[in-house]
Image (cartoon, rainbow, N blue to C red):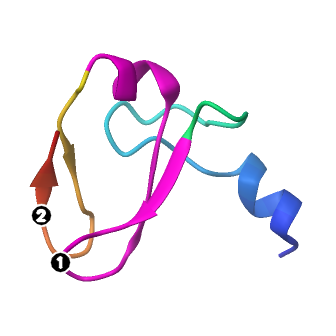
């Protein structure tokens, strides 16, 4: 899968919507390193997220 295809298929771990654009964030889980993506709206509202691999939760 190309990098542009990966960007189109990212889902927010907080609300589940497909995300794209520059306001979305993708980062590694602080505990296990799994890639986590969050939409701009959930980031702005500081919604909690949970890592699907290890269960780590964060704001």
Q: Which quadrant holds residue 47?
A: top left
Q: Position of residue 6 (x, y in %)?
A: 74, 62
Farthest residue, direction bottom: 32
56 displayed left or right of 29? left
- Secondary element at image label 2: loop
Check whether the beta carbons of the residues at disc 2 and disc 1 lie within 8 A of each other.
yes
Quadrant location of the C terminus? top left
40 displayed left or right of 7? left
1 displayed left or right of 10? right
Residue at 37% over, 19% down? 44
* Residue 7, disc: none
Q: Residues within 10 Å of mark 2 (few under 14, many from 20)?
A: few
Residues in magenta? 25-45
Residue at 70% over, 35% down? 22
Label 1 sits on residue: 31
Q: Earlier in the sequence, mark 2 or mark 1?
A: 1
Residue at 60% over, 36% down? 18
Quadrant location of the N terminus? bottom right
Q: Gap in Å between the C-alphas at discs 2 and 1? A: 7 Å
The answer to if 37 sits in the magenta stretch is yes
Residue at 45% over, 61% down? 27
* Residue 56, disc: 2
């Amino acid at each position: 899968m190309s990098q542009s295809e990966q960007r189109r298929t990212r889902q927010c771990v907080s609300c589940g919507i497909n995300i794209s654009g520059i306001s979305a964030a993708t980062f590694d889980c602080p505990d296990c390193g799994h890639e986590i993506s969050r939409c701009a709206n959930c980031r702005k509202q500081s919604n909690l997220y949970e890592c699907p691999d290890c269960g780590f939760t964060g704001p």
